[in-house]
Image (cartoon, rainbow, N blue to C red):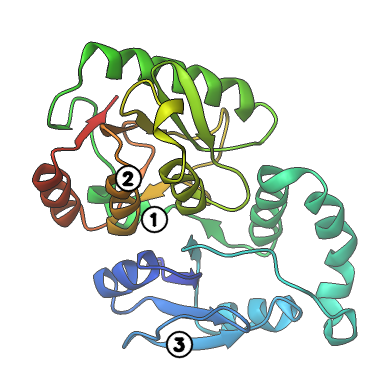
Amino acid sequence: MTDRIAILAGTGLLPQLLAKSKPDALFVSFAGVDVELPQNPHIAASFETLGALFEGLHAAGITQVCFAGAMSRPQLDPQKFDTKMISLAPRLMAAMGQGDDGLLREVMLVFAEEGFQVIGAHQILPDLVLAAGTAVGAQSAQDQIDTTRAQSILAALGAQDVGQGAVVAGGQCLGIETLQGTNAMLSFVAATPAHLRRAKGVFVKQPKPDQDLRIDMPAIGMETVAHVINAGLAGVVISADAVLVLERDKVFAALKDAGVFLHVV
């Protein structure tokens, strides 16, 4: 049997890229999530009626699902729950108290129990990730020191399910990515007074320890690059094969034009 993919769409560019690469994939939009509908076959869904979603996926012959794009935790109305969601609600509500990783792992388990294989965006489009050694521009000795410092901070915080990104300048941590996301952190860094910055600084983006990359792989794109440049940073360091790079050619060109490095480690 040939696998058929459903793209469970959040916001941002990623769902559109996947839909374009797989025109026969089923595009699933969710109530309350603002997405542009591609030309793909489409069904509308709701977080409150997961039973209906599962029925729709099975009816369409879906065997694999890919979670793509940003999706915040929805505000749920229990009065709208269908029978399946009523049975799942205690599990999902308990998982919400365990942080993002705990919730996402529970969501993946629910889909697996319904007979769907969860795959990552990088399994559909392998070119979304970069190999170790890929580089735009060069790091200074201070940049390398700041990179190591940021990596150690993220490794320590990752065990607490906090952050995929950090900015370090001159050995000082200027920002840690939290629930508000990468762009909010970089905006905060951009507003940091000059006298608190001992160097230009490096933005490091990497997965948390044991993070399941099928459903929650970190990502950067042109919007990230714009914030990095606006923050006056020297460069960006990401993990090999573990961070999605959207519109890589545009990202490379923008970084090169701005004199900002990108290193993949």
Q: Quadrant of residue 262?
A: top left
Q: State the SS at label 2.
A: helix
Disc 2: which residue: 228
Q: In front of the other: label 1 or label 2?
A: 2
Q: Nearer the viewer, residue 113 or 7?
A: 7
Mark 2 neighbour density, 10 Å: few (under 14) some (14–19) many (20 or more) = many
Name the quarter where the C terminus is drawn.
top left
Q: Position of residue 249 (x, y in %)?
A: 13, 53
Q: State the SS at label 1.
A: helix
In the image, is 65 to the left or to the right of 54? left
Q: Is residue 193 above or below residue 100?
A: above
* Distance (Cα) linking label 1 and label 3: 18 Å
Q: Position of residue 1 (x, y in %)?
A: 41, 67
Residue 42 is labelled as 3
Disc 1: which residue: 121
Q: Residue at x 59, y 53 (%)?
A: 180
In the image, is 147 to the left or to the right of 72? left
Residue 134 is labelled as none
Q: Nearer the viewer, residue 125 or 217?
A: 217
Q: Is residue 75 above or below residue 126?
A: below
Q: Nearer the viewer, residue 242 or 185?
A: 185
In the image, is 32 to the left or to the right of 66? right
Q: Amino acid at mark 1?
A: Ala
Q: Position of residue 51 (x, y in %)?
A: 74, 78
Q: Position of residue 61 (x, y in %)?
A: 49, 78
